[in-house]
Image (cartoon, rainbow, N blue to C red):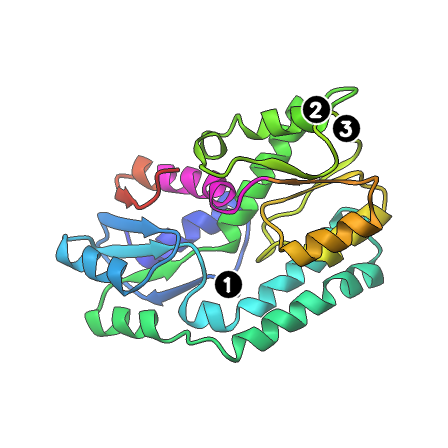
Amino acid sequence: MNTKELMQIALDLVGIKEIPADSAIHVKGEGIKRLLFAIDVSSAELLFARMNGYHCVVGHHPRGLAQASYYAILERQTKLLEDLGVPQEEAKEATRALRESIFLSSHRANWEDTLLLAKVMEMPYLNIHNPLDELGRRLMERKIKEREKPNWKLKDLISALLEFPEIQKAPNPPFVAMGSPDAPTGRVAVFHGTGTNGGYGAAKALFRNGYDTVLYIHIDYQDLERLRKEFPEKNLVISGHIASDMVGINPYLEELKRRGIEVLKLSDL
């Protein structure tokens, strides 16, 4: 297998036609039979892979050029809000501050180090971010729809999330950040797979457009405090970053193994 095929398998899992801005084939390679996977790839993972006979390194979080252009994936937050029923102009405004913040951050990041080492070592290397997060979002959304019933409560939503082995095993379990475990879930929005969490803006837009509960995989404290003050009657559930990422990553790695690729996975989840 080659690096192009490794990427295409991920794209096909969610029906994405082009490699998104936060994913990239950094160093091309052929004849891949053994690969190392890590959520975050640094020089250590590249060196370990070379010293132990692996043919390729696959990471999740953006590095290299995918890190430099990462801000562009935030456009998907606007699209997801629209898909969830938020009017177009409101969706754009809800995501504007976060998009600008990530854009500015991209100009101070050092995105070359890991990429250049992989090139010098001639180690095939790619990172796959949005396709696998989108797969995780769909799986969580499907799980909730399958388990949802009349008079569903937040504690029932947590129980549904814990059916994912990745989330069940996580050292930081899902929790209710706004609301109480016995509160009705009402209408639920799963907001994941759009680069990063939607923060204050996306949750605010969803709460204002008929959603009672928002599911994020993580949130900053400042955003949480603002939401608590402005929407005391609404609910927010946090599923956990790495565990939620692995919900989408593991099916991809299992597909690679089904196709005969040996995978060393640097994650207990």
Q: Write down the residue under mark 3.
A: 183
**Total of numbered circles in the picture?**
3
In the rendered structure, which segment of residues is drawn in magenta?
239-255
- Mark 3 against mark 1, which lies toward the viewer? 3
CA gap between label 2 and label 1 equals 33 Å
CA gap between label 3 and label 1 equals 37 Å
Locate residue 124, reporting x and y percent: 27, 62
Q: Residue placed at 45% from the left, 62% from the top?
A: 62
Q: Write down the residue under mark 2.
A: 148
Q: Residue placed at 17% from the left, 59% from the top?
A: 50
- Where residue 191 is drawn, which disc sits there? none
Answer yes or no: is residue 266 visible. Answer: yes
Q: Residue placed at 81% from the left, 46% from the top?
A: 207
Amino acid type at circle 3 is Ala
Observer-nearest of 178 and 200: 178
Position of 123 relative to 128 (above/below): below
